[in-house]
Image (cartoon, rainbow, N blue to C red):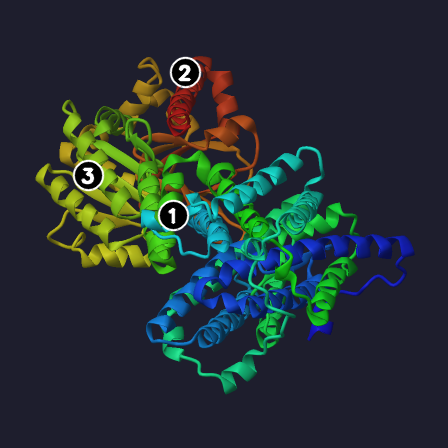
Amino acid sequence: MLANLAQRRPRNIEAATLGRDALAGAISAVVNIAYCISFSALIFQGAIASGFPLGLAALIMGTVVTGFVIALTTTLVPADAGPDTPAVAVMSVLASTVAAALAAKGASPETMVVNVLVAISVSTFLTGIMLFGIGALKLGQWLRFVPYPVIGGFLAASGWLLITGGVEVITGTNLTLSPLSWTPIVSAEYAPQILVGLLFALFIVALRRWVPQYLTLPIAFLVFLIILNVALFGFVSDDATRQHWFLQAVGELKLWWPLTAIAESDIDWGVMALSSAEIGAVCGVTAISMLLDVSSLEVARQKSADLDKEFRTNGLANVLAALLGGVAGNLSLNNSLLLHEAGAVTRLSGVAVAAVCAIILFAGADIGSFVPKAILGGMLAYLGVMILMEALVRAPAGRSRADLALAIAIMIAICYFGYLVGVMLGVIGACLMFALSYSRIGVIRRHLTRYDFSSNVERSPEQARLLHEEGKRVHVFWLSGFIFFGSSNGLFERIKRYIEEQRDKPVGFVVLDFSQVQGLDTSAVLSLVKLRNYCEEHDVTLAFCGLDETMRAGFEGAGFFGSSRPHQAFGSRNEAIEWCEDMILMHHEVGDASTHSFESWLQSELGGQIDFARIAPYMEREELNKDAFLFRQGEPADSVVFQASGGVAITITDEHGRPIRLRRMLGHTVVGEMGFYRGVPRTANVIAEGPTVVYRLRQSAFDKMQAEDPGAAAALHKMIIRLLSDRLEFANREISALL
């Protein structure tokens, strides 16, 4: 399977490149071994301190296996992998939980160590399955949607656990909320080691100013290791005092085989089940750490990684590590940058790291007997502070007080109440913060009245004037986004305020356009029920439009529509506004539009000086039935039409042959003047919506009118110019309102 996952290795690699990769791999291996020593001391302390050599072997095995697999398969070459700091911090919590539960049952230290190692192997195996599943199902991108306060809280908790773990490595005590647990820090027995560890951490920070970052930790580690060993072995004669500065001698490293231990040892699976939250936390933190490391490495390398492939290969590496007795690990940002800065070029550098670590593992060495606890504690504390700074100060969460507060709350909950409580707090807090922030945005994208925005129906002058005067009685709301309990109440309060404040022309209709709404929950429907009840108390009718089937079913289920309700639902916003206009006209019983004759209207529009008899001889009277074509799209525009009665619809045909209605023309009006004056083909169809009477003025007849009766032709010119100006003015007002 590795053969399928691995990319082809370069065929002709120069000796210089091999040398650079080998040197970079050796430097990175030294850093990895130092990490493993510190991590093993962090996990195995107190009652299970005797498990340090097995833990160290497991950590190095995890580094070897994950480093080898990731080096051959990663899309971010060169790269290295191994147990990551946040995950190890969680493993220390898992180890202490298992050990405490077994100690309460009177188990021996050897039994506790074996059970802790099995728990770590189980978490490693499940981590591999989860990571591989995420990659196989192509869910890698979904992890990018985890709220950063949750990630920041996880990382900050890991940083704090590393800081306290560094102190615990030195003192061998368990730090809790009790002040008494912190007293060893200031005792004469441990205060010197705590001080040396603090100086080591500060030395790393100071050294970064003069030495490249990738060399800082190796140099600091070697300098303090030499100085402390010279001081302890050269100037301290008391063996007991000197050994107090080191971990207990453990002899050579011993390999750890999980399957053999499970078959031959007494494993308490009940304790494993009770530790499922911590095991799950190892899986989750490893996934998050890997996501952060891959994302950060993408930025550092200025290239894009195949995230799903990275999850699959990291998952495979963890499954193999679990079977071979290794600890969970993943692609490491710091080690990968170290390889690159040390001069690594190809993926062979990562293989070199794994090879050097394997040599140390299989050769065997009592590493803990010559590495002082102060260095291990200082390294853990330094790593913890760096993670805290990244999680709470430099990260985006530090720029928002609310996000920072939530991240700190999650960190405290994880540190003192466990990862399960921390996860629950993070999810609930992130959801509440999102709901609060989203509700502040509001769902009203735009709000206009009929005074500024009308339907696409052109009516008679009398009707148009009335609708203009009564336009503020119709309010149109464009809604967008997802409407839920927070935003729906804001919608209700805003509409309520408009209804209460408008006194001169009381609101009569409210149009709610849902065409840009992605969905709404039950609480939103309940808030709109309040709006419905309030509108009915104030004689306001709701007109819904743009509802999909799900939303319409929800409103129908809540009793919005029906014979007992005045509220209506329409397919489009234009239909809803048109219906509101019709209701206003019906309420005022506008009679001028029907009693005013076409002849008197035309004479009035021509200025009152030109009567109908002067221009009638030049026109052709036509009676159209329903669906009869007045104009066809694409035909020559050789006439202008004066509408005497009835109505027409202006439509275009889309690319699929379907008609789309652009506008309706009702009452007395002029149709087709644009093409007539511009001399271009008709851009739309004009179809009679019912029995319609029109008068057609053809181009030849108009030319004859200009020659025989210039006064009538001039009046006709002025009439059409005035009509176009009125239409342009209203169009400009609509455009300005929509901007």
Above or below, 327 against 42 in this view is below
Q: Does residue 644 appear in this view? A: yes
Local crowd at mark 3 within 10 Å, few (<14), some, or many (≥20)? some
Q: Name the residue under label 2.
A: 715
The amino acid type of the residue labelled 2 equals Ala
Q: Name the residue under label 1.
A: 182
Where residue 691 sits in the image (x, y, percent)? Answer: 31, 45
Q: Which of marks 1 and 2 is nearer the N terminus?
A: 1
Q: Which of marks 3 and 2 is nearer the N terminus?
A: 3
Q: Name the residue under label 3.
A: 583
The amino acid type of the residue labelled 1 equals Trp
Direction from residue 132 to residue 354 in the image, left or right: right
Q: Identify the residue at image location x=57%, y=73%.
A: 322
Give 610 or 20, whichever is nearer the viewer: 20
Q: Which of marks 3 and 1 is nearer the N terminus?
A: 1
Give 663 or 510, whichever is nearer the viewer: 510
